[in-house]
Amino acid sequence: MLSGFVTVSDPDGGSVTELRAVHATDVDLAAGTIQLGHRPHPTPLDAHTTTALRRVLAHRQATRADNPHLLVNQKTKTIAGPVSTVYLTVDRLAQRGGQHSQHSWPPPGSHRYA
């Protein structure tokens, strides 16, 4: 599990630090992989994640997102910085009263790509 955002075939998944640093160009949809941090090889993605990322990247292209990072929110969509660590922390959802498992990020209904 890739910190709850995308599922990967790699059992180690990715850390929050690695996820925050991912740029849209780190995703290779044709190969079904994502480059995480300084890992020596791209991490394979499962079919569902590849489909979700295809939609995310199409949306980014359609909206001409200024931020090069894959994960953006309302606060970071017009700047070059990554989302905050808190944004990717599952505990934040519990504080908002969200009913979810740690394997559903973003929570159902909160994001069009969930």
Image (cartoon, rainbow, N blue to C red):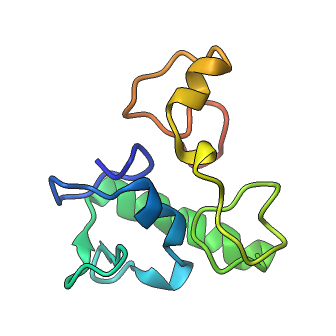
Residue for point 25% across, 79% down: 39
Question: Does 111 appear above or below 71?
Answer: above
Question: Percent from the top left, x then y, of residue 75?
Answer: 82, 56
Question: Percent from the top left, x then y, of residue 88?
Answer: 54, 46
Report the front residue among 63 and 104.
104
Question: Percent from the top left, x then y, of residue 66?
Answer: 78, 80
Residue for point 32% across, 81% down: 38
Residue for point 68% across, 72% down: 60
Residue for point 17% across, 60% down: 10
Left or right of 57? Residue 101 is left
Report the front residue among 30 and 37.
37
Question: Percent from the top left, x then y, of residue 54?
Answer: 49, 69
**Picture quadrant of residue 93:** top right
Report the front residue among 81 and 65.
81
Question: Does 94 appear above or below 58?
Answer: above
Left or right of 18? Residue 76 is right
Left or right of 67? Residue 53 is left
Question: Does 64 appear above or below 95?
Answer: below
Query: Outermost residue, left direction?
Result: 11
Report the label total: 0
